[in-house]
Image (cartoon, helix red, strand yellow):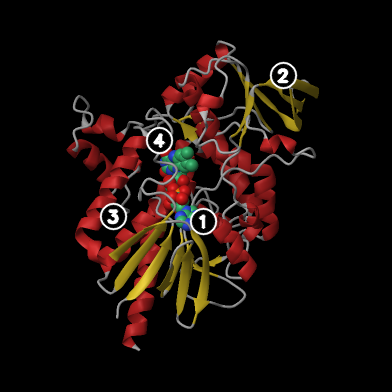
Amino acid sequence: MKSSIGIIGGGFSGCMLAYHLLENTKDLQVVIFNKSSRIGPGLAYEPQSSTMLLNVKAGKMSAFPAIPTDFVDWLTKENIFPLNTREEITDSFVSRELYGYYLDQIWQNILQIHGARITEVINEVITISNRIDSFTIETKTKVYTVQYCVLATGNEKPRNPFLSDKAFISSQNYHQNPWAIPTEKIHDTKPILIIGTGLTMVDTIHYLREKNKNGIIYCISPHGFKILAHENSIVSYDDILEKIQLSGHLADLLAQFNSAKKEIQKRKGSLDALINFFRPITGIIWQGFTPYEKNFFLEHLRHKWGVARHRLPPISFQKINKEIQDKKLNINAGKIKEIIENESGLNVRYFDNAKNKELSLTVSCVINCTGPEGDVSKMKNGLLLNLLKKGLIESGPSNLGVQVSVNDMQIKNTHNIKKLYAIGNLLRGELWESTAVNELRSQTEKVAQEIIRTEKTKNNC
Ligand SMILES: Cc1cc2nc3c(=O)[nH]c(=O)nc-3n(C[C@H](O)[C@H](O)[C@H](O)COP(=O)(O)OP(=O)(O)OC[C@H]3O[C@@H](n4cnc5c(N)ncnc54)[C@H](O)[C@@H]3O)c2cc1C
């Protein structure tokens, strides 16, 4: 009998893992579990608005590591931009919705070719238990038995601000989930507060405006607005980059990063080249850090790395700057101290870094855009909490994701249970960068190869 693999999560990671497994062996059955019925797009590529853009150029968004042009090939084949040259398409920022259709089509192709070996379960997985040589995966209605299990549970809602008065959390005017904002409940002209000033903030502002929410928008985060736009650079800085020596220690790396940055800036160049140099080796560098260095990075350098790494499509950047110029958007660096609901709305007391004093404002609603929760013990995902309790997973380094052996992505656990794997966001503690398509496409291929290898070894014994 063929072994089965249970994949929990049907976003990009689950879908592409299934692809690599099914394409590369005939010996496995796949059971894929997803809370919602669309397998492929996941949270990021089933956006609230069709105008939300990818923050990476189309030319870098292929789902397949071995075919870097696949997404551009698909856009060209579908004739979605008939007036544009292939070069223009490669360089463009297309909508996340369009990327979702691309993933839909990949999934439909997988079903067409390998459908007999796939079971789609549109239901939430409540728990997983280990048996001798197998796992049982339970949904509310049925129990499935598999021999391998992969957690691909993806993005979780942001963490609520840690404030002493927590009553605001249950207010209907506080929105913890920025990816499902009930805009019909938001006042058209009254002020709004967004907590967080990253890419999700930018998406949220565009979305609110699209829905005719015309009130002033305030944003607060510890560092204020520092996001940069992608730059079009064709200049090579190889002479600067080849001088970088990776000793493995954070202080050395930082010195080298800063020195290369200075030299590139002297030539008035784009820092994209420097980021592109570090991106493919971020995981290796991160693994070499001591726990102290990891925590130091998270506390003091995470923001700087985020600014350099997470860029906006130029058009989104221009729109945000126009909002600021028109005084419709007010972005502050500071710390929220209190959110109290009263008859006039939500009263927010915060420390304003620039003014060096406490201020307050009253808004009609608060939207949390602080980014996906990374600490498994704080996630609201019942399955992960349950697995933590059972000791099948353990919190990862710096309390991010889960502990895995990075050679094969098998989860480390107190019971030493094998054939249980994790991919995607759950690997952030082990690899740091484990979010974008760029990383996930290789990760899914690697985990598939590991599982196929283990299965072959077992069959040969
Ligand atoms: C808003 C946003 C925009 C982004 N834009 C870009 C971009 O432009 N370029 C880029 O490279 N990357 C981008 N990313 C990164 C993005 O996270 C990844 O590219 C990718 O979508 C993550 O896929 P995933 O499958 O790991 O997770 P997800 O897409 O979150 O999918 C996980 C799935 O698992 C399901 N699930 C979870 N728990 C259970 C359970 N217990 N039972 C059953 N199902 C469960 C969820 O319902 C979900 O469908 C963006 C991310 C976000 C959030």
Find residue 296 and report its horizontal and vertical position in percent: 69, 50
Q: Is the residue indicated by label 2 positioned so its CB lies within 8 Å of ligand 1?
A: no
Tell me whether the residue at label 3 lies in contact with that at label 2, contact meaning CB atoms closer than 8 angstroms.
Answer: no
For marks 3 and 2, give the one nearer the viewer.
2
Circle 3: residue type: Ala
Front one among 43 and 275? 43
Which residue is pictured at 49% across the width and 30% down the height?
203
* Secondary structure state at the residue bearing disc 1: helix
Q: Which of marks 3 and 4 is nearer the N terminus?
A: 4
User: Disc number at residue 344?
Assistant: 2
Circle 4: residue type: Leu
For marks 2 and 4, give the one nearer the viewer.
2
Residue at mark 4 = 54
Crowding near pointer 4: few (<14 within 10 Å), some, many (20+)? Answer: many
Q: Is the residue indicated by label 4 positioned so its CB lies within 8 Å of ligand 1?
A: yes
Find residue 297 and report its horizontal and vertical position in percent: 65, 48
Q: In the visual, does 290 lie left or right of 423?
A: right
Gap in angstroms between the C-alphas marked 3 and 1: 20 Å
Crowding near pointer 1: few (<14 within 10 Å), some, many (20+)? Answer: some
Residue at mark 3 = 66
